[in-house]
Image (spheres, grey):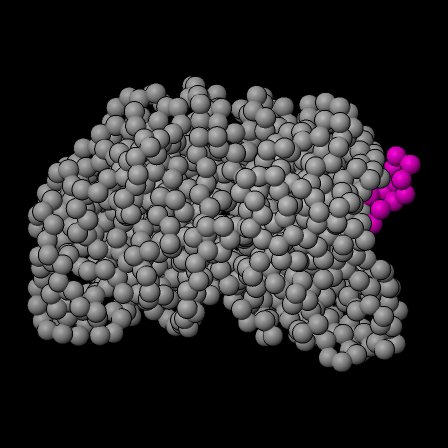
Amino acid sequence: MPDHIRPPIASPAPTRRRRRPRRLVTTACAVTGVAALVAGSLQPLPTHAAPAAEPVLDAALVRSPELSETTRLADRRFVVTGDRAWELGAADGRYPAAGFHTRGEMGGFWTPSMKMLDGMWFGIDGSWIGDGTRTTSGWGYVRTDLPTTQGVAASRTDFVPDGVGGVVVGLSLRSSTARTVTLKVDAHSELMSAYPWGESTPSQKTENLPDTASSTGRSLLFRDRGTNQAGFHDWAAAVGSSLDPTGASTGTNFRGPQSGDVVCPASDSGASQPTSCDDTAYGRGAGGQLRYRVRLTPGATRTVWFAVGGSQNGPTEARQQLAAALHRPAEALAAKVAARRAVQAASRASLPDAPLLQQSFAWSKQMLAASVQQSEDVRLRVTKAGTAYPKPVATLPEMRWIGAGWPDYTWLFGTDGEYTAFAAVASGQFQAIEDHLRALRDVSDAVNDRSGKIVHEVTPNGAVYFGANADAGNTDETAKFPSTVALVYRWTGDKRFLADMYPASVRAMRYIDTRLDADHDGWPEGLGNVERPGMGPEKLDNAVYTVRGYADLAELARARGDRATARWATGKAQTLIAKFERDWWYGKDGARSYADSLQADNAKTFQRHWIGLTPTDAVLPALPAAAGATARPAGPLASSAHANTTLDQHERSCYTGALGLYHTGTGATTDPAGNPGDTCDSVVSAVPSLTDVFTLNSSIAAVSEGNYGRLGLDQQRRYLTGSARAQLDPSLWEMPGAMPEIVPGGDGDANIDKLFTERSMVMQAWGAYGILWPVVHQWLGVSPDLGHGRVAVVPQLPADQQRAALSDVRLGGSRALDVNARHLGNRWTTTVTRHGRIGLTVGAVLPAGTQVVRATLNGKAVRVQSTRTTRGLEVTHKLPEGRGTTQLVIVTR
């Protein structure tokens, strides 16, 4: 990704649409109401609805800080997640067919490996509750304000308890008079595995078997029991409430006010799509309804709880999951919010001069926590990019990972995980990224016979879509594996984790060296993050991450006492560093950038892709002298001269728009589409531009700028602001607080202007990289080396920022830091509090041309060391292991 390697199925890219800005609605109070996704049954009932006079908030339901939206709710998606289930629907409470992998079937209610329901809808006294009037995102839940129906005001809160294979919906009701109402809930099943997809071989057209529906006791039971190419299965979903029903019905429809008559055609049919669908050509679900009598007290709010629980192990376990979901749901919601508040408490940022970035920092941590997924009994099979479906080669008892994006990329990726790892360690979410790396290692070892190759993409039920030994592969994720292990080890100092991951790290780089460098020039062949016509076999991003992979492996080898591997990896890294600029800098025709690829004859090809900034993004650890090269200090791969030249170029309008870095810049091309934008060089490319702005591209641009001390408003800040706005600006967001895969603008329409079946992801984890890492590692300068028991804190504040702080920056071994950086006139103050014993290097990055007059440590004069790095002049003082508060003040002229 972002070029998901998917021959039959392409991720749709959104496009541009300007909307009038609206005021951001935020609250930070104590208790939330509940919401009901609106619905119907076999015979659609009338909908009698009026807007509620005020939101229905149940004081018993815990709330967190919130973001709300009231416009175009039918065009927006919402998602709520837990580690063993999730839900996606429209923000007005309906469930239109959504997603593209199996067209229209990627929304609804899911466990990671299996879809349970298309939707759940509610009615009161013979009328379906109408379209929602407000959607509110909280930390771990979504609330929908609903219109008054038959005199009853309502709201709905959806959340997913962690550790439970089910989704909970609380419907909060309020009446001005004492009355007993008839409450009904419709549920429509679609028991379907996460893979195969609509256009894979086999397809869900043949693999998805019919569901059956029955009512037993207090619940509806949906079941898909039979044999397909995966073998025999017994899948089940149970739907029920905390109340005893007065009646139940089952049948084929039961979709509330959605008739079920509008069906999306199969994606390979060639038929045009309706603007919105209730069901799909792949659908073979069943439906049911439960009815209740509910007593309401005048003016009081009563919340009725509903849930669905699912299992791939039959009805008994599905009912157990339903029971777990309905066990003290208000307490479960409180526990969910408490867990998310704990996420906020770690690495808590205070950026008083950058409030939008501070808010994005908080919501990006929440987004990352919301992306953790887990499956059990994962049967691994190599599907050869969707063309085969062999028997499983192995079964993993458990697989836990950080999902890439919702709803179509919720599974395990190699490439995404490395970028997301930086956000994970910066926010103290160590367990999540360690689990992700173990999952990658376990799957790769099983399907690739411990060759060292790291898989690209694995669905929650074990389909290895791409990345087996026989696949062309993504070379970069194999090279990234040891770098991600090294990153986590630096932040945690976890020697058990290092010992566990080290053998796979060695195998990864040995695989690249022996299997992916046919011409023996050191630059690996293979697929990369961008694949476009005319690219040569050796890609820039693969080359960059290979250099870093060798350097990081050398550091890991030294930590393990493996001298032979350390010497070998150091020599490989130093050899490639010595010739990198010569081999890859394009340096002609005004390009001012690196070549995107090398042809078989080593001719350089330049196509203006975002990967041109990977040399400025990738930071290498310090390397000892080797292969005739002198020792190299830690720092980014690209030379300062070339880095600043290409960063200047990429800030221009042919590469960067209002919200971030284009996928492929504009300029002269032989493609029939022509050049739709500005021209910044005289190179004639063979491919058209693509001005979609992926949040990953902007993340790499932001980090690149920070690596070279370029923190200005027209430098790093433009990329930080673009991603933050896509997440928090009501004129841009789709779901409040969720950073999307692709921001509005560019070559296509914004997500909310596209069909639900043709959208990019509403929430994508990788965007957190471009917010959390710049603030923690660059602005506040936190750089741990826990393997050696030390941490450096050397802040660099942008010129317009006088102060910034982080509280409870988590490190391994239950250690943590508080960091405060201030700049006032000619005084630079860095204050660090160490919680737990650790060595410290404290300092600040000073602007060019400044001179140190004096420095004091806790009020006493000290000597400082000045070192020129790519960030600028780093002025530091080194302290031994200790704890408590240290303040360094540097006075300049």
Q: Which residues are magenta?
A: 623-636
Q: Answer yes or no: is residue 545 visible.
A: no
| Vertical side of 310 occupied by 888: above or below | below
Residue at the extreme bottom = 825
Image quarter hosting the N terminus = top right
Inspect the magenta stretch and tell me whether residue 629 lies in it: yes
Q: Answer yes or no: is residue 352 visible.
A: yes
| Magenta highlight: main SS | loop
Total residue callouts = 0
| Residue at x-position 80% and y-position 42% | 581
Q: Nearer the viewer, residue 742 or 352?
A: 742
Left or right position of 352 against 412: right
Give residue 446's position: percent from left, percent from top: 54, 25
Left or right position of 35 against 256: right
| Vertical side of 309 occupied by 469: above or below | above
Give residue 784's position: percent from left, percent from top: 70, 54
Image quarter hosting the C terminus = bottom right
Q: Nearer the viewer, residue 751 or 132?
A: 751
| Vertical side of 490 occupied by 479: above or below | above
Left or right position of 524 against 169: right
Inspect the magenta stretch and tell me whether residue 430 lies in it: no
Residue at the extreme top = 391
Left or right position of 421 against 167: right
Q: Nearer the viewer, residue 329 or 822?
A: 822
Give residue 83's position: percent from left, percent from top: 42, 46
| Residue at x-position 55% and y-position 29% | 467
